Amino acid sequence: MRNRVREQRTQRGLSQAELAAALGVSRQTVISIESGRYLPSLPLAFTIARFFDLTVDKMFDPDDEEAGT
Amino acid sequence: MMSFIPPRLRKPAGIALAGAVFAAAWLVRGGPLWWVSIPAVILAAVRAVSWYRMGGEDTDEGALAGSRADERQQLVSLKSRALACNLAAVAAFIGLTIAVAVKAAWWWPFLVILAVTGFGYLLGLSSYGSGEPDADEDADAGQPARSAIQR
C-alpha cells in the first residue's frame, strides 16, 4: 500500500523526527511507514491524515500493493 | 501497576527485583553454595544498569527497554515474544521426546513447560478473542446468510 507521508512531510519541510514528535510515535516508525514496511493502525492513520489536512484514503492508497506488512 | 515508577526505570527495576529474589533463594537454600547469591546480585545490577542505559537510546530496542514503545515497537515486541514462546514449546517437546526415549527421570519439567505454553495460548485466545457477539449488537442473529446481490 503506497502512502503520501514522505511527500507531505517534505512539502512542509519537516524532518522525520519532527513529524514523529508531532504524531507521538518514534522516528523509526515514521521511517517504516514512509517506506511501506509498516501499515499504521486506524487511529494512527487518522492522526497522520488529520495532521496533513487530508482524508485517510487520500493519504493511503489501498489500490497500490507496492509494499506493506 | 508500575505507573508510579518512571517508565525508563520500570524494566531495570524488574530485572533488579528478579535478581534480588533469585539471590535470596540461594541464601535461603544455604549450604556451601550460598555465595552464588553474591554474583547473582552483581549480575542483576549490571544487567539493570545496562538496560537503563539502553533505554536512553534512539532505537526500537531502546524504546522497549525504556518502556516508551509506540504501536509498531509494541508489535515488534509482541511478535518477538510469540517467537520465543514457540521456540520454548518446540524445545520442550524435543526435550520431552528425548527424555521419554532414554527413560530419563527428568521428563516432567519439559511437560510442565509444554503445559504452561499451551495453557498460556488458550488463555490468550479466551482473553483477547472477540468472543460471542452481544445479542443486541448482532443484527444478523437468526437470519440466514445472504449474498450481497440478494440484499
Image: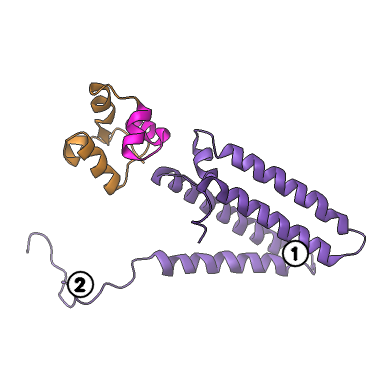
Chain colours: A orange, B purple
Q: Secondary structure at mark 2?
A: loop
> Would you say residue A17 sits in the magenta stretch?
yes
Q: Chain of mark 2?
A: B
Amino acid at the residue labelled 2 = Asp
Q: Few, some or many C-alpha atoms within 10 Å of disc 1 (few <14, some 14-19, many ≥20)?
A: some
Of residues B5 and A46, the one nearer the viewer is B5
> Which residue matches tag 1?
B99
Of residues B75 and B113, the one nearer the viewer is B75
Pinpoint residue A14: horizontal percent, then vertical percent.
Answer: 30, 24
How far apart marks 2 and 1 lie (CA) works out to 50 Å
Pinpoint residue B48: horizontal percent, then vertical percent.
Answer: 65, 46
Residue B138 is tagged as 2
> Would you say residue B109 sits in the magenta stretch?
no
Extent of the magenta region? A16-35
User: What residue is shown at x 68% (from left), y 44% (from top)?
Assistant: B47
Q: Chain of mark 1?
A: B
